[in-house]
Amino acid sequence: MQLYTKILIGMVLGILVGALYNGIYDKDTWAKWDSNQDNQVSLAEYLTANELPGEKIRADFDKIDQENDGKITLREYQLDFFNKSDLNQDGKVVLEEYLDGVKDSAYWKALFEQDDANGNGYVSMSELVEAHFDHERWADMDKNDNGELSFGEFLAESKEENAAETGAAFASLDNNNDGNLSLTEFKAVYGWQRFAKYTDPIGDIFIRLVKMLVVPLVLVSLILGAASLGDIRKVGKIGLKAFGFFMATTAIAALIGIGVGNIIRPGDGLPPEKRDDLVAQYEASASAKTQTDDAAKMKKQDTFDKISALVVRLVPTNPFKALSEGDMLGVIFFSLFLGLTITMIPDEKALPIIKAFDGLNDAVIKMVTLAMETAPYGVFALMINVVAALGMDVLLILTKYAIAVLIGLLLHVSLTHGSLILFYLRKNPILFVRAVKESIVMAFSTSSSSAALPISLNVSQTNLGVSRQVSTFILPLGATINMDGTAVYQAIAALFIAQVYDIPLDFTQQMTIILTATLASVGAAGVPGAGMITLALVLSTLGVPEAGIALIFGLDRILDMCRTTVNVIGDLTLSAIMAKSEGEEINIRLDKDLIPG
């Protein structure tokens, strides 16, 4: 079975398991809590649902009132306090009873010896009361200070104590601190959704395993690619052509997104109460994505600052720091600089270096091949988490928005990339996509251009016939600055949020979306969720409430998978175009997969 088939199977199984997890929860308890059936539980509803019943309090009162005279004396209350420790009800508390069910036995042994004031081997009632009875609490309960509790006093104290504990329990469930419990928050504790956390580490390990190899792969492959190109003028020519292509296609992508957003108008007709529910449900997570230091800096920069900051970021102050932090722009510059420098030294010194990096490159590729064997399991775990958390309700509510984004992405791939493949490369676009299917599946399943880079390099060289020199230069560069899919998404998302809030955007503002989305996407990290930060920048430029990001946060992971796929198709298209522009022959092969069999 082919690798991409295994990944697809893992993805489908993950969706099914995630849907199962999302659909199974304690419906009776939720119905009891949600008394007004508005799909959220207020603190008042929660307190009412979890209030101690009067009969339970009455039973506790009668148990303490051993004389059955309708009142609890101080002696009776202290006796009840003692009996909770006197497990075998023999009138004394021995060391074994102190140690019952505890972990820190040394502490409780020391406490027992301290409480056993006369050293007779047990703690009497008077000794225990003297050491631990809460006299202040008794005084608070005994409102009229007559040395006994009526049922009314006992009832009031029990309800007050229960309300405090219940309120604390409510706060622990209210993850976004909006004063209400959503069904999603309820499921995270009282549904099968909570079991998704047990597969989370599998997905996290897979993503970390792939990302672990990205930096060394980019470093080694770019050094080899630059060293193999030889002529510095050739590098500069290819680099300028690639950058121009990326900027042009990104601007076209944003323009397509604007067109689709205006025609479909996905934000019209969303009920205000549903909008508020979605904002409350995802606002905390969206804020964590967008209210970062990087996002704050980007919002304060004008267009010139953004461009100049990008140029400055190309040159790392410490290449080893860039490598350790995964700063891909810095890694790319350093790799190209080192590779070009190797071509300037004598051959007898350059060849051993190239040979060493060539061997290291083979080793890294082998590591990638082994890592890809774990992809089906990693994707399975990732999809469980996504679907278990989101369920189908949010997906159905935002279907119109999702369809608009998917249409925009499909139009960009068909019209922009498809036209280039058909008219410039003179190849069948469908065959082209089939040839790079492994990279497409990896990009879709991981939502990361960087994670798909190892596969992209392989299919570009093996299935398209692009030379190593071109592919190892273009693809790492594209994974960093080519964000066609992100530009489509940001344009539609900005219009969608503005439409939901009923904020009209004129022609100038919509052109601003194209410019901002194009510039913001350049240099964005090729990792899941990078588009969220840049979308916040686009919204702040337009004056649209950034809290609206919470509306689409629930679908972000799924749409991120789709837009990353478009980004990677664009990278592979450009690698073939650059190869042909340099006189190489593009030959599409469909019989070569990274892991055959």
Image (cartoon, rainbow, N blue to C red):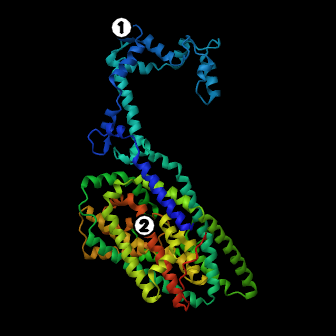
Residue 190: x %, y % from top left = 42, 41
Tell me the tag on residue 69. 1
Q: Is residue 524 above or below residue 164?
A: below
Q: Identify which residue, 157 or 550, lies in the foreground.
A: 550
Amino acid type of the residue tagged 2 in the rendering = Gly
Q: Quadrant of the N terminus?
A: bottom right
- Between the residue at mark 2 and the residue at mark 1, the CA separation in whole angstroms equals 71 Å
Residue 277 lies left or right of residue 485; in this view the side is left
Q: Identify which residue, 397 or 520, lies in the foreground.
A: 397
Q: Quadrant of the C terminus?
A: bottom right
Q: From the image, tell me which residue sits under label 2.
A: 531
Image quadrant assignment for residue 26: top left
Name the residue rendered at 48%, 13% in the picture. Answer: 79
The secondary structure type at the circle numbered 2 is helix
Residue 167: x %, y % from top left = 38, 36
Q: Residues within 10 Å of mark 1 (few under 14, many from 20)?
A: few
Residue 163: x %, y % from top left = 36, 31
Q: Given the current orientation, which residue lies at the most extreme bottom position?
A: 583
Amino acid type of the residue tagged 1 in the rendering = Asp
Q: Is residue 480 visible?
A: yes
Q: Residues within 10 Å of mark 2 (few under 14, many from 20)?
A: many
How many discs appear?
A: 2
Q: Is residue 335 above or below residue 201?
A: below
Residue 521: x %, y % from top left = 43, 72
Residue 346 lies left or right of residue 173; in this view the side is right
